[in-house]
Image (tube, rainbow, N blue to C red):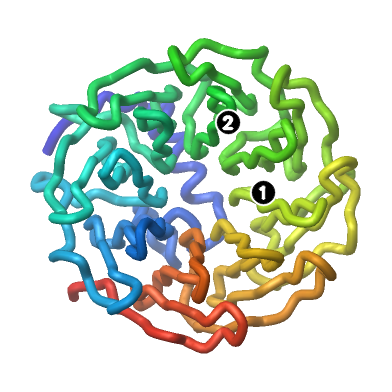
Amino acid sequence: MRIRNISLTKTLLLLLVLLTLIPGTLGCLGTRTVPIGWSGGTIDDGNIFLGSMEGTLVGIDTSTHTRLWVDVTLDDDDQPIIYGSPATGNGLVYLASYTGKIFAVNPGSGVIRWVYPRTDALDPIVSAPVFHDGKVYFGCSDGKVYALDADTGDLAWEAQTGEQVWATPVIANDTLYIGSFDKKFYALNTSDGSTKWEPFQTEGAIISPAIIYNDTVYFGSFDRHIYALDATNGSLKWQSEVTADNWFWTSPVISNGNIYAGCLDGKIYILDVETGTEVIPAIDLESPVSSSPVLSDNTAFFASEDGKVYVIDTTTNESRLLNDLEEKINAALCADDEAVYVHTQTNESLFALNKQTGVVMWKLELSSK
């Protein structure tokens, strides 16, 4: 077993978060205290790529509902634990593991192109990788944000924050936006990792991936508020008046002038993007929302941990139950023109639900056991 340079303080903090999160989040299913991973799917050219709970990369053809190749074993020494959705670009699929590595895989053959680091490993990676303009970016539990050459996996730069970085980067106008456990939100130049503006301070850790809209960056914090910052200078536009009853963990979506944010308190908060005021009272799903939603046309799809998938018409803000899969859902949702795809964790499977009716169009079991 490799010895990783993870400080006792960081390890204890990671464990504390794992244990204090709601039951089921970050792998604490019942009495389990070890991470198990859940990866959302990424759609590219009619295929879905996702990480399995067995630590493999799975590629699925959405037209035939079959695997593209035998699931890719990412590490011969350890079973990778995968939380973030894969990224695609430059003719490769990129995947991060909690065991501290980034993998680049050929989507046609399933052959691993490169691994970073070449030897040993980084601290745990919860962040999903992001491909942009020839580089792959991700956050790490060592408190750094990394940029790699997407073709070779060589390190381009690294930037230090004050604590663990579990958030997934978002990139716009050559600026990378990301939050940290140090309660700050950062804007970094994608060329060299230098700070673009003074990090914005909140009162809680920031794990929620941000979203960019009309030169404004929006994100949720563990202080139970949603924030809107000017993307060019980091100045505060607004902080949500409403205070949630738990942490904002997932990425929000924006549609028709409103921001929709799921929360671990089981509610979906709908706020005006210009003012941060509530448009309607929060929609209570009565089960934590740890799965990032997906937006398709004027419909926002959300999943609750108890296995229910909901739709919100963003033109009217009316919500309804699309399907009750009766399986735990933590992984981010994804969608194409016909279906919304749900990676479930109880009996690990990928469901394709008709976006209008919620009918299961097909289902593929992912576990090899």
- At 68% from the left edge and 56% from the top edge, which residue is drawn? 263
- In-image side of 33 versus 264 (left or right): left
Of the numbered discs in the image, which one, if any, rests on residue 247? 1
User: What secondary structure is found at the residue carrying circle 1?
Assistant: loop
Note whether residue 181 is visible.
Answer: no
- Is residue 200 positioned above or below 12 on the image? above
- In-image side of 228 versus 90 (left or right): right
How dense is the environment of label 1, judged by Cα within 10 Å: few (below 14), some, or many (20 and up)? many
Q: Position of residue 328 (x, y in %)?
A: 48, 72
Q: Position of residue 93 (x, y in %)?
A: 28, 47
Q: Position of residue 269 (x, y in %)?
A: 78, 57
Q: Position of residue 62 (x, y in %)?
A: 34, 72
- Is residue 16 positioned above or below 325 on the image? above
Name the residue that disc number 2 marks.
172
User: What secondary structure is found at the residue carrying circle 2?
Assistant: strand
Measure the C-alpha gap from mark 1 to mark 2.
26 Å
